[in-house]
Image: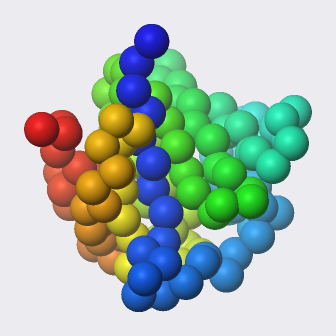
């Protein structure tokens, strides 16, 4: 079983994100009209999007805790593309942190720049 990455607002600096699950769903579907956004699990949005032809990605948004999560498998650029798009659209000025499930050390992540810079700032964990 692999690890999972998490991305959330930096609650120490900004509190929770102000957007709702419905806004996340609307944003994803606006950018990827053929994406599937499911509420099959309580308190979660499960997102499955084809971000480029033949390139699918899966991630979750925890409605209760306001955090995105995705597994450490395949290219991380897929879920990071969706997360960057949502944050760039709905919460551009909110400080963001990331962590991996086996290490709770919070690391800053900046969604304000380009998608390429966002992906490049997400190096593999030590």
- Observer-nearest of 99 and 85: 99
Left or right, 29 with respect to 49, comes to: right
Please give the name of the residue rendered at 41% of the width and 87% of the height, measured from the top-left corner: 13
Please give the name of the residue rendered at 55% of the width and 84% of the height, measured from the top-left corner: 15
Left or right, 122 with respect to 16, comes to: left
On the image, which quarter does residue 90 sit in? bottom right
Please give the name of the residue rendered at 27% of the width and 55% of the height, measured from the top-left corner: 105
Left or right, 110 with respect to 71, comes to: left
Location of residue 54 with respect to 122 vertically, above or below: above
As drawn, the residue found furthest toward the top would be: 1
Residue 43 in view here: yes
Residue 118 in view here: no
Location of residue 102 with respect to 105 vertically, above or below: above
As drawn, the residue found furthest toward the left would be: 126
Q: Position of residue 5 (x, y in %)?
A: 41, 41
Q: Position of residue 94 (x, y in %)?
A: 45, 82
Is the C terminus in the top left, top right, bottom left or bottom right quadrant?
A: top left
Location of residue 112 with respect to 118 vertically, above or below: below
């Amino acid at each position: 079983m692999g690890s999972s990455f998490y991305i959330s607002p930096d609650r120490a600096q900004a509190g929770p994100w102000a957007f709702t699950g419905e806004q996340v769903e609307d944003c994803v579907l606006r950018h990827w009209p053929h994406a599937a956004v499911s509420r099959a699990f309580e308190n979660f949005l499960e997102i499955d999007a084809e971000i480029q032809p033949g390139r699918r990605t899966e991630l979750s948004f925890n409605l209760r805790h306001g955090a995105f999560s995705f597994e450490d498998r395949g290219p991380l650029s897929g879920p990071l593309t969706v997360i960057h798009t949502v944050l760039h659209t709905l919460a551009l000025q909110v400080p963001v942190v990331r962590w991996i499930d086996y290490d709770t050390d919070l690391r800053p992540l900046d969604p304000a720049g380009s998608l390429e810079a966002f992906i490049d700032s997400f190096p593999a964990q030590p």
